[in-house]
Each structure stands twice: as C-alpha cells, then as structure tokens.
Amino acid sequence: SALTEEIPNLLLDNYSVELGRLGIFSLYAQCEGSDTPEAVNETNIQKVNMVFRAGNHIKKLLRTASFSKIPAK
C-alpha cells in the first residue's frame, strides 16, 4: 500500500520510478503546440498520462507467450 501512495507523489515531483527488473513508471504530457516560446504555458497541456515501460526480464518473458482461440459457447 505504500507504493500506491508514494509512486504518484514521486511522479508528480517529476521523477521516474524504477522498480528493478519489473520496469519503470513515468509521466508524459500531451500538449498543444504554440507558434512562439512566449506563448507556451500550462494551458498548452491537454492531458497527462502515466506510462509503464517493462524491464528487459519482463519483455523476454512476454516474447514467449502463446495464444489459442477459445471456442465460442
């Protein structure tokens, strides 16, 4: 439960959060462009999302995934 409180705090303080081999959490902002640097301010930010980038260990495991079709009922 400490992770659920601490990770958002760190992300909002502009830190990426690395959880060892599991991966990295970070934030990214979707912004509207401006014609001049002077026109850039917080109103340009349209949306902020959290991103998870899996660590190499997880990526390797995911490459071994197999899939099969489930028969319809």
Image (cartoon, rainbow, N blue to C red):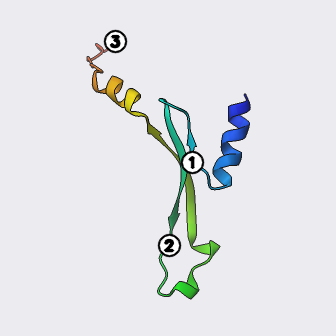
Classify the position of the C terminus by image quarter: top left
Residue flagged by tag 3: what amino acid is it? Lys
Along the polypeptide, which appears first: circle 3 or circle 2? 2
Classify the position of the N terminus by image quarter: top right
- Farthest residue, direction front: 20
Helix, strand, or loop for circle 2?
Answer: loop
Question: Which circle, 2 or 1, is nearer the viewer?
Answer: 1
From the image, tell me which residue sits under label 1. Answer: 16
Residue 73, numbered circle: 3
41 up-or-down from 35: above or below? above
Query: Image point 66% across, 41% down: which residue?
Result: 7
Mark 1, Cα crowd under 10 Å, few <14 / some 14-19 / many 20+, is some
- Residue 36 in percent (x, y) is at 50, 87
Mark 2, Cα crowd under 10 Å, few <14 / some 14-19 / many 20+, is few
Residue flagged by tag 1: what amino acid is it? Ser
Query: Image point 49% across, 30% down: which residue?
Result: 22
Question: Which circle, 3 or 1, is nearer the viewer?
Answer: 1
Question: Which circle, 3 or 2, is nearer the viewer?
Answer: 2
- Residue 40 in percent (x, y) is at 57, 80
Helix, strand, or loop for circle 3?
Answer: loop
Query: Image point 52% across, 32% down: which residue?
Result: 20
Distance from label 3 to label 1 (Cα)? Answer: 45 Å
Residue flagged by tag 2: what amino acid is it? Glu
Count of picture labels: 3
Query: Image point 27% across, 19% down: which residue?
Result: 66
